Amino acid sequence: MNGHHLILGELVDFITGQILKDTHDERIRQEIARRLINQKGYTKMDIEPRKALVVQADDKKAVLKVDFIITLAGLVSMVVKYGPGSLVTRRRAVLAVSRLIAPYQVPVAVITNGQDAEIISGPSGEVIDTGLEAIPSKQELTRRVADEIMEPISKRQAEMESRILYCYEVDDSCECDDDICKL
């Protein structure tokens, strides 16, 4: 079932070499991957695409795919989430991801629609910069992470962040969205 997603064929994932469905959204994700590697200095080994994240609200569970997880020196240092349309409405969801993808607060969260981006401080939740060019390079992120204290996320906060993410990403999703799997 393809629903509203136009399948244009297949494409090869820039990072992993996997064969993926060729959709407009996937083409934008591939451009983001190319930007991270070709312009921002990350290696393919620094980036984990489509990382599964289990979220829960009461007895409802789902698995989401986080577009890009950037790991430097063994620490998840940045999450990058793609979403079409308005960035403002997606800020809270990417912040929740930054608090669930590791047992500590990830320092940087990026939300992008492929044309613009907001760079968010994980600890404060504030937008610290905007624009695709403002996405931190590997060198910039390495410096930033060196100064960060990776605060642990409490069980209670993780519960709340999971509920928030479930509401934003799962409750609002359509049945044909194959980036989300309700359990």
Image (cartoon, helix red, strand yellow):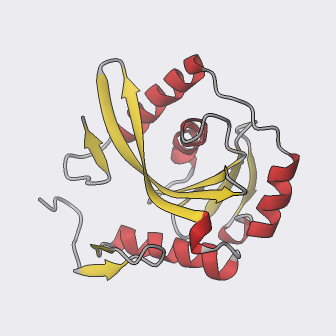
Residue 176 is situated, as x and y percent measured from the top left of the image, at 20, 52
- Left or right: 55 in relation to 119: left
Q: Relative to 37, say whether 57 is above or below.
A: above
- Left or right: 109 in relation to 146: left
Residue placed at 88% from the left, 47% from the top?
147
Report the front residue among 31 and 155.
155
Residue placed at 60% from the left, 42% from the top?
98
Residue 78 is situated, as x and y percent measured from the top left of the image, at 65, 53
Q: Relative to 50, say whether 104 is above or below.
A: above
- Left or right: 22 in relation to 136: left
Q: Quadrant of the C terminus?
A: top left
Q: From this viewpoint, which residue is outermost toward the left? A: 1
Residue 113 is situated, as x and y percent measured from the top left of the image, at 51, 63
Q: Quadrant of the N terminus?
A: bottom left
Residue 173 is situated, as x and y percent measured from the top left of the image, at 30, 44
Residue placed at 62% from the left, 77% from the top?
37
Residue placed at 57% from the left, 20% from the top?
155
Report the front residue among 83 and 35.
35
Residue 171 in sight: no
Residue 47 in sight: yes
